[in-house]
Amino acid sequence: MFSMVKRFSIFNRNTLSLFSQRIYFDRTRSLSDVSTIYNEELEQKEEITQNDNQKDVITPALYAFAARMHLDFSDPKILLQAVTHKSFTDTNLPSNKSFKELGNCAIQLFLTEYFHIKYPLLHTNYLKDVVEVYNGRSTLATLGHEIGLNYVVRWNKSTDVFSTPENDGQSESTDTNESQVAYKSRKVTYTIGRVVAQAVQAIVGALYLDKGPNSAQTFVHDHLLSREFAIQKLYDVKEPKRHLSALMKRLEREQPISRHLYIPYIVRLLHEAGRKTKEPIFVIGTYSGTEKLAEGFGSSIKMAEHRAAKNALLNHYFKEIKDFTLPSTIDTYQKQMSYIPTKVGDTPAKI
């Protein structure tokens, strides 16, 4: 009996030892598996973080562009966001859409202020056309290519967007209800000219927001207003003589008189040549009373009168002020007290 008890105790002790070893082995293996899983997840997170950091790296080309254009932002990522188009998706930064909207308004503000002061008699309809020429897509795209913005802008040629009325200012058809429009996608193709033009506006908006309106205004004056456009060609009127008569009437001046030259010594500075030839030349002077408003030439008297009347309108509306002070540059109280505002341009005279 004693021997049986002894053997049973030895058996139990061996069994407990094996059971303990199995439990220890299972626990060790489970801890090892947990450690392996944790290490794999940590490696995945580090890889994701590393990939995210590589997405928005400031390239040497962008650094060179910023140095060349003297763009000293408080954070280099601001410039990187300004050159990131909304079609570019491999980034953690927002697109430049908000910068672009602000820059567009800022450019229009500075251009309107400049041309209103420079041409105070230009009526508002053509003032808007002049601003659109300088802030147009072709002008901004040309500027962007000249300064090398096309080499640093981040964009994709095409992308899928929702065809909602808010996208690019394009409204969809009202035949479908709002819920159907919100979930309908379409393929949009972008051109480098459009992307570069929007990037120029975004840079101006970023300057306005980060460095202040003076920096944005300096950029606009240096790179946009330094360009020369034949803005007088925008003034296209079909009946200049009637418009000139209406303008003189509104200005309470004497009605314009068109005099053409029949006898050279009666009206000086106006003449004709080759009246009885195949190619005659007539020079016409348009007068208000005795004041000569403009001259015009042509192969016929009617053509010369047409051009003279149009030139008189151009001389009036595009009368340029050489030395002027912009209201936005007045920074002292003394200048504010002595500043005389310019009268806003009027609408065209009714005929």
Image (tube, grey):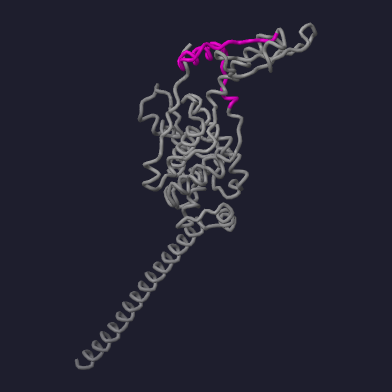
Residue 175 is situated, as x and y percent measured from the top left of the image, at 40, 21
Q: In this view, does 28 lie above or below 125?
A: below
76 and 51: which one is in front?
76
98 and 26: which one is in front?
98
Residue 107 is situated, as x and y percent measured from the top left of the image, at 48, 39
Residue 160 is situated, as x and y percent measured from the top left of the image, at 49, 38
Q: Is residue 36 above or below residue 250?
A: below
195 and 160: which one is in front?
195
* Left or right: 4, with 63 as reference point: left
Quadrant into which the N terminus falls? bottom left
Name the residue furthest right. 277
347 and 256: which one is in front?
256
Name the residue furthest front. 265
Q: How many labels does the image show?
A: 0
Residue segment shown in magenta:
232-261
Q: Is residue 150 in the magenta section?
A: no
* Left or right: 35, with 87 as reference point: left
Name the residue furthest left. 1
Name the residue furthest top. 276
- The residue lying at 46 percent from left, 53 percent from top is 78
Residue 311, quarter of picture: top right
- The residue lying at 38 percent from left, 29 percent from top is 180
Residue 121 is situated, as x and y percent measured from the top left of the image, at 49, 26
